[in-house]
Structure formats: C-alpha cells, structure tokens
Amino acid sequence: MRTEEIIARFERYVMNTYSRHPLVLVGGEGCWVKDIDGKKYLDFITGIAVTNLGHSHPAVLKAIEDQARTLIHVSNLFHIAPQVELAEILVKNSFADKVFFCNSGAEANEGAIKLARKWGGANGGRYRIVSALGSFHGRTLGALSATGQKKYQKGFKPLTGGFKFVPYGKIEPLRSVLDDSKVCAVIIEPIQGENGVVMPPEDYLPEVREICTQRNVLLILDEIQVGLGRTGRLFAYEHYGIEPDIMTLAKALGGGIPTGAVLARDDVAMYLTPGTHGSTLGGNPLAMNSGCAVLKTILGNGLLDNADAMGRYFLGRLRTLAERYKLIKEVRGKGLILGIELKRKDIGKGIIKRCLEKGVLLNLTEERIIRILPPLIVTKGEIDFATEKLDESFKEAS
C-alpha cells in the first residue's frame, strides 16, 4: 500500500486532531526510522520524548515479548509482580516512598491533582492549585485546567475551578499568591517543553521549594517530558538540589507502551486509600515489565552520562549555527531536550519541512521553536548529521 492511500484512509476514518507529517512510518532501529517507501530518517522527535532508548531496543523488546507470552492484563484487583518491581526501582532512585501507576501523562497529572486536594482537604480544607503561565499538563479536563495556555483551553469551558496562574520563572508573584490560605499545591515543570524548551533561572526551583516548605504547600513536579534521563540526570529536579512532594512521570516510562506514574512521599501518598483513585489498565504486567527494562537500561548502561555529554556537544553545535544565521534568536536546553528559537514565526514550518526532506525528523512548537529530542543513545555522528541538515536548511531559508 502506498503513502497516499494510507493518508486518504486516515482522512476518511480518523478524527482530525493532529497536523501530521505526510509520512507513514513502518520500522525503526536505534535513532532511525523508515517509512513505507523505504526512506530512512534520523528521529529527533522520539515520539515526543517517549522512545528514550531509541527504536527496537533489545532489552525493551525482550521484556515485552516475555511478558506478552505469559500475562498481559489482570487488573489491580490482584498483586502484579512487575508492578512492584518497577515501583521499587523508582522509589530507590528518587525522593518517593510510594508509586501509583496509570496510562499517560494527563492521567498522572489528574492523579497528582486529586492527591494534592485530598491532602489539602485533610490539612485545613485547602483545594486551590497554583500553576505557571505557559505550562502544559495534559488534555483531560483537570490537567487542561492546570495548563497555563489559553489556546489549549479554547472551546472547552467551563474548566475545572480552583486553579491560579503565575508567570513561570518569577518568584515574587508566586510568593504573593501563596498568601491565599486555600492553596494546597504548586505544580511546575522543571523545563517547559511544550512551551518551547523554556528554561527557568537556576535559582528558581530551589526558591519555589523553599517557599512551598515555608507555607506548608505541596510541590508537584511534572517531569513527564523531562524525566527519565532526558536532561542527563534520571530526574530533572536532581540538577537543582531539591526534592518535590509529588512527581508525575509518563512518556518514556513504558518504552513506548502507554504508562504513567504518580510518585509521592509516604505522608502525602497515605491520603489515597482504596476507592479514592484507580485505573483499570494502569500498572498492567506488559507496561510494567517494559518499564523495568527501560529503567534498568537507563541506570545501568551509562546513558545518563551519554545524555549529558551529547547534550553539551549538540548545544555547542547549535550555538555555532546561531552565530552563523540571523534567523536564529536563541539556542537553549539541558541534556537532550534542546530548542532553537527563531526570530520569525513564518519560517519554522519551512525549516522542519526541509529537514524532513533531508532525512531528519524535528518538531516545531509555538510556531517558532524547533524542539529537538534525540534518544539517550545518540552518537556524535548522528548529531553531526542532524546539524549538517539544519545548516543546509537554514542556508536555504536565509
């Protein structure tokens, strides 16, 4: 079947909720994918920070195959061995004492919101949650209500109440809003990914942590995009010498199998008791066994060091491009979440299209930020290839 035929069938049968590239991808290995016509592409989208180990990683494939041959689903009415194994790995390598498993990032943030409000209700009847302008926490109604971007909320009002918003990266507005005695939590992304790889000042998260502690307010870190090695540490909060009270994960956690998680300290997690929250498919054996393989590989194969080193190398290469082309306003990032901010909105789609034609898959967000998310296994040679194609694309656009 040809690309055009499949695209035509998509238009007939699939809801039009995505602006899709005109490709039909059918295979992948390492940092590369191929389309139905046999053309190869360097994948620096990674399923939007999902395939952190690249495509067809042997450890993930084996975990999925082994589990699929024995038991795929039984529900949380029973104890699931791979679920407790993955929970133990997460707890032993983070601040947390307990984990709740679900299926996606939006579900994880919904769980965090419920947990924070349950805790707040028991600690003074508090329910309001403070979020940041420019944030993205998911598309379900609660997560959407916590998202500080009106474009995603348009057409879906009335939203869930009880959310307040402050500018990202600025302390004084947050300090002021926490004078509200009904605030129970603050939810923050360590790096705003969907908003264009927006980096906060280095002292921002430590100050947020300090203020939350002073006011007895929970700090929720949404690490759905930046966690699990993306920044060169297992979790982004490790860069700042702090710990959250609650953290949400998803995307890369299942190695491509839908998986989300809410992590929390014991004194917070205790408020979710039987009947207060749940997920039929969350924590199923297939996703959990895949997740175990993902975590063990990230922790045991030097991939955190590689993400850090390759991120620094890539950032340096991109800054060379920024010096060469006036179209580029700024290059920024940490580890292997990188952004090229353009000076004009009208050139971004053209750059992405040119790179695609040259064999590199990149993502455009906010119409003018090229978001780059290589797998943690990326090599200098692959970074050089991508930089070369970006160079050619910018030269053609200038």
Image (cartoon, rainbow, N blue to C red):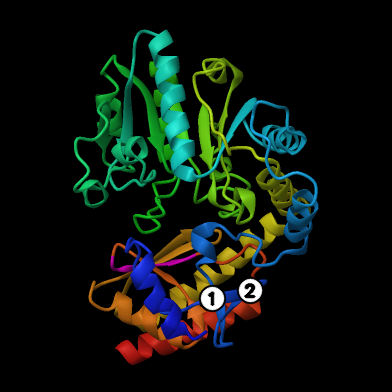
Q: CA distance from mark 1 to mark 2?
A: 8 Å
For label 1, the SS is strand
Comparing labels 1 and 2, the label whose residue is closer to the camera:
1
For label 2, the SS is strand
Counting from the top left corner in percent of width and height, residue 132 is at 31, 40
Q: Quadrant of residue 184?
A: top left
Q: Which residues are magenta?
A: 367-372
- The correct choice, above or below, for 51 with respect to 349 in the image is above
Q: Residue at x 46, y 79 (%)?
A: 23
Q: Which mark is residue 25?
A: 1
- The correct choice, above or below, for 8 with respect to 192 in the image is below
Residue 369 among those drawn in magenta? yes
Q: Residue at x 24, y 35 (%)?
A: 159
Counting from the top left corner in percent of width and height, residue 47 is at 52, 63
Q: Residues within 10 Å of mark 2 (few under 14, many from 20)?
A: some
Foreground of the two, 77 or 152 = 77
Residue 379 shows in this picture: yes
Counting from the top left corner in percent of width and height, residue 266 is at 60, 19
Q: Quadrant of residue 26?
A: bottom right
Q: Residues within 10 Å of mark 1 (few under 14, many from 20)?
A: some
Foreground of the two, 369 or 137 = 137
Q: Which mark is residue 28?
A: 2
Residue 273 among those drawn in magenta? no
Answer with left or right where residue 215 lies relative to residue 337: left
| Kind of residue at badge 1 | Leu
Q: Which mark is residue 361?
A: none
Answer with left or right where residue 117 lies relative to residue 176: right
Residue 209 shows in this picture: no
| Kind of residue at badge 2 | Gly
